[in-house]
Image: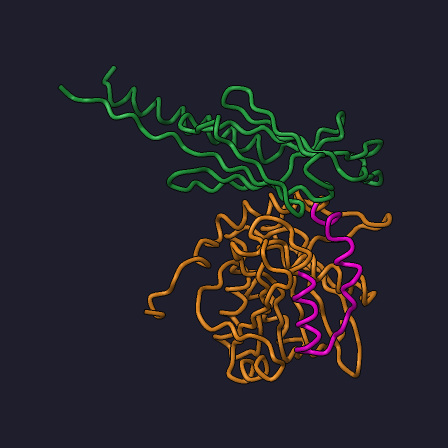
Amino acid sequence: MPKADYLVVGMPDVGLVGLIASTYLVKELKAEMVAYIDSPFLPPVILYHEARPYPVMRLHHHAEGGKDYLILVGEVAVSATGVHSLAGKLVDWALDKKVSRIILLGGVPTPQRMKLEKPRVYGAGVTEDDVEEIKRAGISVFKEGFVSGPYALILKECYSRSVRGVALLAESFLNYPDPGAAAAVLTTLGELIGVKVDVKQLLEQAEEIRIKLRETMRRTMEAMRESGKAYEYTIPAMYL
Amino acid sequence: MEEWIEESFRRFRRELLRFMREVEELVKPFTDVESGEVEPLYEVSDRPDRLVIRVDLPRVRGKEDVEVLRYGDRITIRARMREPLRISDIPFYSGCDIRGYKLEIELPSNADVEGIQATFRAGYLELVIPKRRAFRVRVE
């Protein structure tokens, strides 16, 4: 198992942005699976693709420009009860692999999404250096509001151990698969850490993705209901 | 039997039925393989004076391919895709072309079904259903 500079995480959540983005990233980069995560909190499933079995939470490896990237693709949502231990283990493991930064790919729900041609991507940083880097890359800084669900716990773990981390959150639909938001997040990822992929094909396949991921979206909604997603529409008292 | 015990049983039974319905919903597929129709994703927002139902209909070309029918307080939405989608590698879908969408929604009793408006734009269908105002009964 190689050491890595970056851990890029894409899990199913709002608009399935993380899942769509990480799946496309792995496919475009032809990043090979090098490890997987198992937990009793994951549903009892294994998936098959091109006649080969794949665990539902996989780590892929990619090397480019002298840097090593690990990409986590979470195919199914982890139940609210399992997210705590997963977040802790993931950060432990990243530290063990000498990962210098954890990048989370996801969405932030906005009711205006239908009207947005190009969704904006916000960067939520953990340390001051992260925020500086978000600014330097010309990305909008996520300044106010709650982040909830699995990414909130990963950010919290990073915070408590002073691990560098950034969540890239694109404005997205809450409960429709959103390939447009995933494309925006991937473009921003390129600006932040230099892994560039052409999102043209992703945008061309957008309609097909929206149909095919309907069921995954519904199952994810169930998990999101438990994970305090409603906090993301909540104005924190600190903002008063 | 004491009334409160009966009421507790009734409540328990209601809860149990609701739970069973939810479980059924969770395991049921959202595709009718026989007809090649899938249930689209949709959301309902309940505003003070109206209900807004937004339905995600990717691959539907235009309003001429969308049909909204009302029977009493039920609405049936059907839409045809621009071209069928084949997912034949997955056994559940083998031999099935997904051709369109079908969604049935039961409206609440205060929905003004005569005033429904439907708009299709960029792959999304929006239904706006006004709510009937409550009728005030004079108290003598």
Residue A196 occupies quadrant? bottom right
Asked if A188 appears above or below B105 in the picture, the reply is below
Residue B23 picture location, percent across and down: 55, 33
Residue A16 picture location, percent across and down: 63, 54
Name the residue at the left extreme: B140
Tell me: A191 left or right of B83. left
B63, A89: nearer the viewer = B63
Instruction: State whether the magenta stretch is mostly helix, strand or loop.
Output: helix
Asked if A107 appears above or below B120 in the picture, the reply is below
Q: Chain B appears in which tint? A: green
Residue drawn 83% across the image and 65% down it: A30
The magenta stretch is A182-210
Letter of the orange chain = A
Residue drawn 74% across the image and 43% down it: B59
Q: Quadrant of the C terminus of chain A?
A: bottom left
Residue A11 occupies quadrant? bottom right
